[in-house]
């Protein structure tokens, strides 16, 4: 039988008087927003006029998100990200830094991690669906970015062999020089160019 019910407050303990000494179970019907429902607490009320105290603790979810370079595995700063719940509501948003980003007190459930803007020179990542479990243990997910990779070979037209000593440069669509070099007997490699139209 229910012998008492109330809503907790932030500033004081709840007091119940004149209960019959017996064994009782304290049950949380609804947890505060951002917290998981606490486990039930079984206790014995002793036959004494002294104040007897019991405590019930609520934990919350802890999510660590790593934004990584796909090739090196290093942390990657400058990505704009957000998390959506199952209804498409944005529940968190941030710009990545060279460290783990932590989000706390999300309700357990289904979510999607979305990259809105990739760091300069990187390709935007696909969204990541994940399930946040009802546990106070740290849960982790990662999302990585790849980048463009371009090899340019200067060749002898007749033999097809690599040709060294040519001065070359690459211009973007606005005519800005984005790379310049002298060819060698190996292809020239450029990484992290923004997708688009270029002129060699």
Image (cartoon, rainbow, N blue to C red):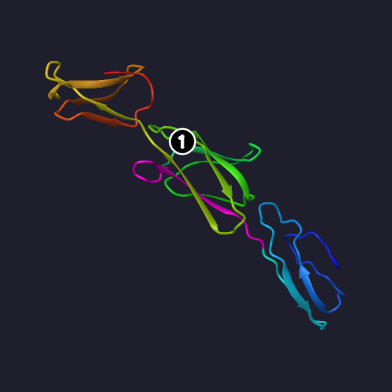
The percent position of residue 16, horizontal first and vertical second, equals 83, 70
- Element under label 1? loop
Query: Depth check: 101 or 22 in front?
Result: 22
Name of the residue lying farthest toward the front: 159
Vertical placement of residue 117 versus 61, above or below? above
The percent position of residue 180, horizontal first and vertical second, equals 23, 25
Vertical placement of residue 68 versus 36, above or below? above
Q: Looking at the image, can residue 166 be seen?
A: yes
The residue depicted at 62 percent of the width and 56 percent of the height is 60
Question: Going by the image, does 29 lie left or right of 106?
Answer: right
Instruction: Determine which residue is flagged by label 1.
Output: 125
Name of the residue lying farthest toward the bottom: 48
The percent position of residue 175, horizontal first and vertical second, equals 32, 17
The percent position of residue 132, horizontal first and vertical second, equals 58, 50
The quadrant in which the N terminus is found is: bottom right
Tell me which segment is drawn in magenta: 58-75
**Magenta span contains residue 65:** yes
The quadrant in which the C terminus is found is: top left
**Magenta span contains residue 110:** no
Mark 1 closeness class: few <14, some 14–19, many ≥20 residues within 10 Å = some
Q: Looking at the image, can residue 52 be seen?
A: no
The residue depicted at 39 percent of the width and 36 percent of the height is 146
């Amino acid at each position: 039988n229910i012998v008492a019910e109330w809503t907790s407050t932030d500033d004081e303990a709840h007091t119940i008087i004149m209960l019959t000494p017996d064994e009782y179970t304290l049950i949380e019907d609804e947890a505060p927003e951002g917290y998981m429902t606490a486990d039930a607490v079984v206790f014995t009320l002793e036959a004494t006029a002294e104040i007897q105290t019991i405590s019930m603790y609520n934990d919350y979810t802890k999510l660590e998100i790593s934004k990584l370079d796909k090739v090196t595995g290093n942390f990657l700063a400058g990505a704009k990200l957000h998390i959506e719940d199952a209804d498409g509501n944005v529940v968190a948003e941030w710009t990545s830094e060279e460290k783990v980003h932590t989000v706390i007190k999300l309700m357990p459930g289904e979510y999607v991690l979305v990259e809105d803007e990739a760091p300069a020179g990187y390709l935007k990542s696909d969204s990541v669906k994940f399930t946040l479990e009802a546990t106070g243990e740290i849960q982790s997910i990662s999302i990585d970015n790849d980048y463009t990779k371009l090899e340019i070979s200067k060749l002898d037209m007749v033999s097809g062999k690599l040709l060294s000593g040519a001065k070359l440069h690459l211009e973007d669509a606005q005519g800005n020089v984005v790379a310049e070099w002298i060819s060698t007997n190996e292809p020239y490699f450029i990484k992290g160019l923004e997708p688009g139209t270029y002129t060699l």
